[in-house]
Amino acid sequence: MATATAPRTPSRPARAVRRDATGPRHHDSAGPLAHTLLAAVVLASVFPLYWTFVVASHGDNSVLSGATPSLVPGGHLLANIRRVFDTVDFWKALGNSVTVAACTAASNVLLSSLAGFAFAKLRFPGRGPLLVAVVGTVMVPTQLGIIPLYLLVTDMGLYGKLSALIVPALVSAVGVFWMRQAMTENIPDELIEAARMDGAGALRTFRHVAWPGVRSTAAVLGMFTFMFAWNDYFWPLIALPPENGTVQIALNQLAAGYYTDYTLMLAGVVISVVPVLLLFALLARRIVAGVMAGAVKG
């Protein structure tokens, strides 16, 4: 009685086996050189902030005048912070900057997202030329528009008020183009058509279909807009009086005079950095997701 034998599988050639064994290896993690470079970049990025903290924590400018500056923080940080609030009205400056930056960031996220949705997914006459005109305003230097903007703000009765900083920055051409690209890349046209077939209007389609797909990108836009408004110095210097200025104006007042007290000025810088760091900590996951959006295909 013959016994059944399993079919033999053809053996792979020895050359193929050797080729597989000696082929290129794919590493799941970076090597020591990559980690070293990343550590160096991190240190180079963090050191200026640490050095600011070190100088602000000393009692005088001796840390800057020595042949070998000390890298160890001192014990006068709280005293220097109290001096900052005693020298200028820093609380008011902080409140003004938070108000201007928050309103500017929120309006830019909302209006830029709406405009980006319109340019990306709606069909209306003159869409292409209008988008070109909006993006073309980016090429105009800000300094060229300062005098007309000053005259306009003065005629509207906004000079000296925080609205003089908020109204001209409610929406930006960069934000519109950024959100338009995000809508184009992340929101398929099929979803928009399906929402229209279900009877959804433009605003409802934006809210329930388009917005969930670009929230991470909008967080990045909001963060950058907040930082730009927070760090702006030129236009607040023109549009606001010194007694109603922003953080950057207050820091300039700390640095004014024949003798610059760097410990006092950098203590003010340490205070001004805290709100930005807190905002970044709150939006860190959204920002990373927005920056990496589109980096991975498939």
Image (spheres, grey):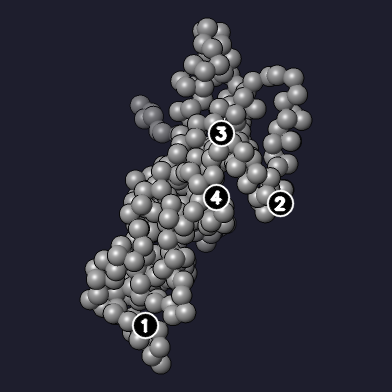
Q: Residue at x 28, y 80 (%)?
A: 59
Determine whether, in the image, residue 49 is placed left or right of residue 140.
left
Label 1: how many Cα within 10 Å (few below 14, some 14–19, many 20+)? some
How far, Cα to Cα, is label 1 from label 2? 39 Å
Vertical placement of residue 53 versus 9, above or below: below
Looking at the image, is mark 1 or mark 2 earlier in the sequence?
Answer: 1
Q: Which residue bears the numbered disc 2?
A: 144
Q: Check disc 1 and give the amino acid type.
A: Asn
Q: Amino acid at mark 4?
A: Ala
Q: On the picture, is 114 further left or further right than 281?
A: right
- Disc number for residue 145: none
Q: Residue at x 63, y 46 (%)?
A: 150
Q: Position of residue 168 (x, y in %)?
A: 58, 40
Q: Which is nearer the eye, 214 or 186?
A: 214
Residue on which disc 1 sits: 61
Q: Amino acid at mark 3?
A: Ser
Say whether residue 217 is visible.
no
Marking on residue 112? 3
| Label 2 Cα neighbours within 10 Å, binned few <14 / some 14-19 / many ≥20 | few
Q: Earlier in the sequence, mark 2 or mark 4?
A: 2
Determine whether, in the image, residue 77 is placed left or right of residue 261. left
| Count of all numbered marks drawn on residues in the image | 4
Query: How far apart, in angstroms, are the residues tagged by discs 1 and 3?
Result: 46 Å
Q: Are marks 4 and 1 in contact (CB under 8 Å)?
A: no
Quadrant (top left/top right/bottom left/bottom right) for the N terminus: top left
- 101 or 159, nearer to the observer: 159
Q: Is residue 1 visible?
A: yes
Instruction: Write down the residue under mark 4.
Output: 239
Relative image position of residue 205 (x, y in whole percent): 51, 18
